Image (cartoon, rainbow, N blue to C red):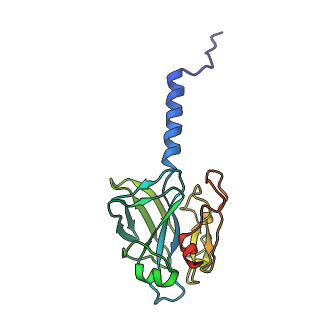
């Protein structure tokens, strides 16, 4: 009887490990974390998109772009700090009037109230993240015209799925995400929410 050895050659093991690590790294990094696409008052210019860097190292996003629904290019030297957020608004002045904080912008284009795709590409055109949001179930239904936004429940979730998001009340001052890899409880929470609490 000719029995083959169950042992896997070392080079195959190393290749499998490399592929696993590469896939893990590809899934890490900056995510589209919050979207405010339909203010309660249609006259308000407070639409915004929030990016989150959930990792332990700062990320230089010089030359990165928000595309599809909106068109915005991040200026040279733009960084997102560890556990940090970056807001981009349709109208930074309108955002400041509504939330009391600063945001980058303005962007060209707009966020469709019934839903559309938001894409984040790096400076070489590689896709970093994508959200194809909708206004109806299973997406947070209260985010449509109720004055709040929709916020990603956890940065490791697939943010192209409606079930990965929740409604974020405009008056919310503190939102906590439980994530073991973050260095402190409450490290993740919307910048817009923190502005509202000030």
In this rendering, the answer to whether 111 lies above or below 80 is: below
Q: Is residue 61 left or right of residue 46?
A: left
Judge by depth and name the residue closer to the eye, 122 or 189.
Answer: 189
Q: Measured from the top left, where is residue 104 in percent x and y? A: 40, 71
* Residue at the (61%, 15%) spot, across then down: 4
Judge by depth and name the residue closer to the eye, 46 or 6.
Answer: 46
In this rendering, the answer to whether 10 lies above or below 136 is: above
Q: Is residue 155 left or right of residue 88?
A: right
Q: Measured from the top left, where is residue 126 in percent x and y? A: 38, 53
* Residue at the (37%, 76%) spot, across then down: 106
- Image quadrant where one finds the C terminus: bottom right
Q: Is residue 158 left or right of residue 179?
A: left
In this rendering, the answer to whether 146 lies above or below 157 is: below
* Residue at the (50%, 64%) spot, across then down: 85
Q: Is residue 195 left or right of residue 121?
A: right
Q: How many marks?
A: 0
Specify the farthest residue to the top: 1
Q: Measured from the top left, where is residue 57 in percent x and y? A: 49, 50
Judge by depth and name the residue closer to the eye, 105 or 22.
Answer: 105
- Image quadrant where one finds the N terminus: top right
**What is the quadrant of residue 170 in the picture?**
bottom right
Q: Measured from the top left, where is residue 109 in percent x and y? A: 37, 76
């Amino acid at each position: 009887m000719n029995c083959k050895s169950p042992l896997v050659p070392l080079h195959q093991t190393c290749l499998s490990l490399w592929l696993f690590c590469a896939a893990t790294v590809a899934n890490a990094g900056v995510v589209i974390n919050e979207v405010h696409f339909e203010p309660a008052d249609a006259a308000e210019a407070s639409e915004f998109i929030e990016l989150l860097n959930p990792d332990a190292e700062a990320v230089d996003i010089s030359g990165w772009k928000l595309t599809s629904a909106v068109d915005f290019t991040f200026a040279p030297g733009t960084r997102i700090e560890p556990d940090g957020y970056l807001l981009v608004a349709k109208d930074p002045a309108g955002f400041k009037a509504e939330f009391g904080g600063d945001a980058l912008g303005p962007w060209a284009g707009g966020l469709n109230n019934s839903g559309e795709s938001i894409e984040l590409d790096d400076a070489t055109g590689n896709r970093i993240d994508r959200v194809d949001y909708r206004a109806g179930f299973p997406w947070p239904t209260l985010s449509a015209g109720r004055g709040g936004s929709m916020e990603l429940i956890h940065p490791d979730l697939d943010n192209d799925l409606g079930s990965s998001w929740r409604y974020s009340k405009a008056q919310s001052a503190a939102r906590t995400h439980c994530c073991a890899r973050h260095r402190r409880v409450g490290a993740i929470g919307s910048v817009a929410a923190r502005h509202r609490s000030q």
